[in-house]
Image (cartoon, rainbow, N blue to C red):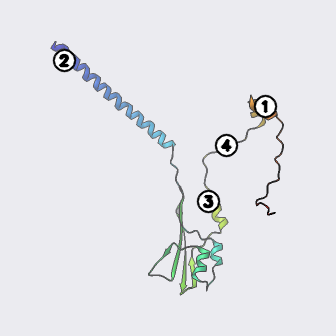
């Protein structure tokens, strides 16, 4: 009997080692597959926009002598105001798009009391130029055509209710008269 117990323990150990080796081999092939899948699937990366966009048209509308409220009406609320520099407003705009360098534009507005004294900053794009730069994202691959030709549609004949609906006469046009919005006082 002791020989039989020894051989069954050896068989159990061999099966356990074989199962462990199979699991390790399976994990390594799964790991390789997950790396291949991760290289194909890329996460969506958002555009990061911070601050107030100030256009060339807005800067051209500024005039020396305007009040703080008039400047705020044209440019919006400043991104940076400081207790230590109460006579200065900073308008900073940054946009970070995936695969492109960080774009930063800055405009500083100086006041004397409540009156605009001067302003200084980067050359600002017009609104049209800025919008055009947003639409210039590179697209991956060719955009598929989403319209079927008559030859492609002929390969799939209409069946059942769809065929009957296509042959049926169009419905009568809906009346364009509407009831009055308010009840008339009589």
Pointer 3 residue:
134
The residue carrying pointer 2 sits among few (fewer than 14), some (14 to 19) or many (20 or more) residues within 10 Å by Cα, namely few
Residue on which the image places disc 1 = 164
Q: CA distance from mark 1 to mark 4?
A: 31 Å
Mark 1 / mark 4, whichever is N-terminal: 4
Mark 2–mark 3 Cα distance, whole angstroms, equals 75 Å
Who is closer to the viewer here, 26 or 79? 79
Q: Secondary structure at mark 3?
A: helix
Q: Earlier in the sequence, mark 2 or mark 4?
A: 2
Determine the secondary structure under disc 1. helix
* Residue 182 or residue 33, whichever sits in front: 182
For residue 167, side relative to residue 105 (left or right): right
Q: Quadrant of residue 18?
A: top left
Say if 22 sits above or below 121 in the image.
above
**Residue at the top extreme of this rendering:** 1
- The quarter in which the C terminus is drawn is bottom right
Pointer 4: what residue? 144
Give the residue drawn at x 55%, y 79%: 109
Which residue is drawn at the image coordinates 16% and 12% (left, top)? 1
Marks 3, 1: nearer the viewer:
1
Mark 3 or 4, nearer chain start:
3
Q: Residue at x 50, y 48 (%)?
A: 43
**Distance from Cα at disc 3 to Cα at disc 4:** 22 Å
Q: Earlier in the sequence, mark 2 or mark 3?
A: 2
């Amino acid at each position: 009997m002791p020989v039989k117990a020894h051989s069954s323990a050896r068989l159990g150990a061999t099966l356990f080692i074989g199962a462990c080796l199979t699991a390790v081999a399976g994990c390594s092939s799964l790991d390789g597959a997950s790396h291949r899948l991760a290289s194909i699937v890329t996460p969506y990366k958002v555009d990061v926009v911070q601050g107030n966009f100030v256009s060339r048209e807005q800067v051209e509308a500024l005039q020396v002598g305007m009040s703080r409220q008039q400047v705020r009406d044209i440019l919006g609320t400043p991104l940076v105001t400081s207790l230590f520099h109460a006579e200065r407003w900073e308008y900073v705009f940054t946009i970070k798009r995936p695969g492109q360098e960080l774009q930063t534009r800055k405009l500083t507005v100086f006041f004397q009391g409540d009156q605009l004294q001067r302003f200084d900053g980067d050359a600002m794009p017009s609104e049209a130029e800025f919008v055009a730069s947003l639409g210039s994202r590179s697209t991956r691959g060719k955009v598929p055509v989403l319209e079927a030709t008559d030859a492609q549609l002929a390969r799939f004949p209409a069946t059942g209710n769809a065929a009957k609906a296509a042959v049926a006469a169009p419905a009568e046009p809906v009346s364009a008269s509407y009831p009055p919005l308010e009840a008339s006082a009589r």
